[in-house]
Amino acid sequence: MTAYQLGVATDQGDKTGVLLVNLGTPNRPDAGAVRSFLSEFLHDRRVIELSRWVWCPILHGVILRLRPKRSAAAYQTIWQPDGSPLALITHQQVTAVQKHIHQHYSNAVSVQLGMRYGQPSLQSAMRHMAASGINHLLVVPLYPQYSSSTTASVFDAVAKELMTWRNIPELRLIRDYHLNKGYLSALSASVDSHWKTHGRNELILFSFHGTPQRYHEQGDPYFSQCHETASALAKQLGLEKNAWRLSFQSRFGRTPWLKPYTDQTLRALPDQGVSSVDIICPGFAADCLETLEEVKGQLRDVFINAGGQSFRYIPCLNDNQDHIQALSDLVQHHLGGWPTKPHQ
């Protein structure tokens, strides 16, 4: 199927595609696959906003020469027999959400997975739905908090693909769900379950992926939405003000990123009299390299080496039943008004 032959069919009734999108992952834990993945990721103008004249020599001359080998070694520490945790978990999420949606809409709604970078690609998922004759497309970036570097990047990729379609579907995109009741309830239930099983440490740290400070200064709402999520979750958990903190992890480069930084926060806690900490990453829909290798591994070492006694990582929501229900309810809400006929 070539450009401009793509698009919705006109004689197959009303069909809706639901595209769940996550960041993506290399398909193998080796330097070659990681280099290919990083090249696609770091060429995204939404991720790196520097001039290409400045950025491309750095990317190709330094980063893609040195980082793939190091990142591949990190991936190897978390890789599962069937693939990366992010890929496995996200496929499980799509299957589970599809099952829920089918209970209400039968085959009128198709749920597909598209990775923003890597495979299965967002483009391939959209073209699969086009071939089935969708009339409506709901895009669900699995990023609870909006950022131009994540959600807007998904929009760009969807729009770029639709530019090649002759007959485009009606389009909706979920911008964010950082205060969604189902999402917050799932997070609260996950923390409660962890505490009942493992006990509760002195402090819980809500750690979000960082972004450059200038993005916030230029109007990106991500910083504010992270604070809103953390505050709402703390309230739902009934936490006192001194029982929780918010921080930002994974800064890159020399420019200032959102503060406080997670590593610096953890390093300082023992001197502040906090010897035990729980940490959760509410901005991630699925565990991945960043949560499993960086947070659960590297940041644990930072805290323990600084004198901390107990560090417990609370997993992402992954395919927990409460999370799947929250995502399914979110999808159904945003399908409202489209002529997908629920089962009676």
Image (cartoon, rainbow, N blue to C red):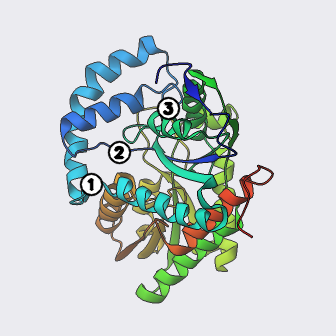
Residue that protrudes farthest toward the top in the picture: 53
How many angstroms separate mark 3 from mark 2 (CA)?
Answer: 16 Å
Residue ID at (21%, 46%): 29
Q: Secondary structure at mark 1?
A: loop
Residue 142 in sight here: no
Of tags 3 and 2, the one toward the viewer is 2
How many angstroms separate mark 3 from mark 1 (CA)?
Answer: 25 Å
Q: Secondary structure at mark 2?
A: loop
The x and y percentages for residue 91 are 41, 56
Residue ID at (49%, 72%): 320
Label 1: which residue? 83
Position of the C terminus, as image quadrant, is: bottom right
Using residue 243 as the reference point, say whether residue 54 is left or right of it: left
Height in image: 194 above or below 86? below
Residue ID at (54%, 60%): 98
Q: Residue 25 bears which disc, if any?
A: 2
Say few, some or many: other residues with alpha carbon within 10 Å of mark 2 (under 14 / 14 to 19 / 20 or more): many
Q: Are marks 1 and 2 in contact (CB under 8 Å)?
A: yes
How many angstroms separate mark 1 from mark 2 (CA)?
Answer: 10 Å
The x and y percentages for residue 153 are 56, 34
Tell me the amino acid under the disc marked 1. Gly
Using residue 85 as the reference point, say whether residue 187 is left or right of it: right
Q: Residue 121, located in which quarter of the rendered image?
A: top left
Height in image: 122 above or below 335? above
Q: Nearer the viewer, residue 315 or 337?
A: 337
The x and y percentages for residue 269 are 45, 67
Of tags 1 and 2, the one toward the viewer is 1
Label 3: which residue? 47
Tell me the amino acid under the disc marked 3. Val
Q: Residue 312 bears which disc, if any?
A: none
Tell me the amino acid under the disc marked 2. Thr
Q: Nearer the viewer, residue 63 or 76?
A: 76
